[in-house]
Amino acid sequence: MTDTVDKAPAPPEQIKAIPVRHYGRWVAGAVVLALVALIGVAFSNAKINYSVIPDYVFAPDIVSGAWTTLYISVLAMVLGVVLGVILAVMRLSSNPVTSTVAWFYIWFFRGTPVLVQLLLWYNISLVFPILNLGFYKNEMNQVMTPVLTALLGLGLNEAAYMSEIVRAGIQSVDEGQTEASHALGMTQAQTLRRVILPQAMRVIVPPTGNEFINMLKTSALAYSVQLPELIKKATDISSTSLAVVEMYFVACIWYLILTTVFSIGQYYIERRYARGSSRNLPPTPLQRFRKNLRIFSSFRRPEVAR
């Protein structure tokens, strides 16, 4: 009698996963690198004296122009934010007069170029030669200085955009918050100041930061009204040194410095106002750097003493 030996079933063959080859990515990467190389070669062969650029980056006139750019941008942004909040409240008001006036303001200033508005303010003396407020009277040419012209042209235009940002932020807050505030005896102004606007800041802050960074660059249009900002100073220097393109590179360096600094500030402000809506905030670049540093140091094993 032959004993029958039960044979165990053979194990299944191990599956080998073969990654999909994305040849299009390699082609796209090669094309991009080729274009970058061509641009680099073009600028390296151009008639640009790169050695003089560091000499002018911190020149007194350039630093003064950068300070004027920052100064007028901050003032215009403050004016735009304050007036934008007022216009947003007017737009949401049930009063047809205030809502219509706010709508017309937004329609006009958003529908016309900033440069045209600056030139209108700069030449306002052709329409009103004398400014007479009763308690103050002076020639309009003396009143409308380049600083005031740039402030009004940039700030009033920014208010139209900020009003829409604030309005969107206010409307993002649930209506139940308003009803609960009124039930507690708060007035409309108290509800707006203490309940609605603090919650709306999460929606308002990110586009407001973008608007300010855009304001830093839009302020270059004030060159047309003789404001001594960064572009005006760079152009004045280039007219005497004949380093035209080099001075534009210097201006670009300063714009990049300003926008980078304020972009970092915007990032941390957004994190602060996002705490109420997100329990787990993403790590900051500094936190990610420290984490990677700890991971890197963990690979370094101390030698065992003999």
Image (spheres, rainbow, N blue to C red):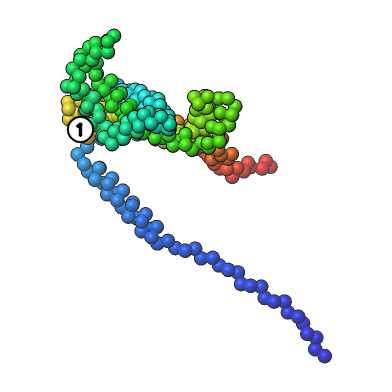
Residue 275: image x %, image y %?
55, 35
Q: Write the residue at 47% across / 36% down.
A: 171
Residues 217 and 283: in front is 217
Residue wearing tag 1: 244
Seen in the picture, residue 190 relative to 7 is either above or below; the reply is: above
Q: Is residue 130 above or below residue 34?
A: above
Q: Position of residue 185 (x, y in %)?
A: 58, 25
- Image quarter of residue 296: top right
Task: Say what secondary structure mark 1 lies in.
Answer: helix
Q: x, y (%) of residue 155?
A: 33, 26
Quadrant of residue 211 in the image?
Answer: top left
- The one of 94 and 186 positioned closer to us in this rendering: 94
Is residue 32 in view from this perspective? Answer: yes
For the point 53% across and 37% down, the residue is 174
Q: Is residue 57 visible to the viewer in this orientation of the structure?
A: no
Q: Position of residue 303 (x, y in %)?
A: 63, 42
Which quadrant is home to the N terminus? Answer: bottom right
Q: Residue at x 55, y 38 (%)?
A: 277
Does 287 sit above or below residue 120?
Answer: below
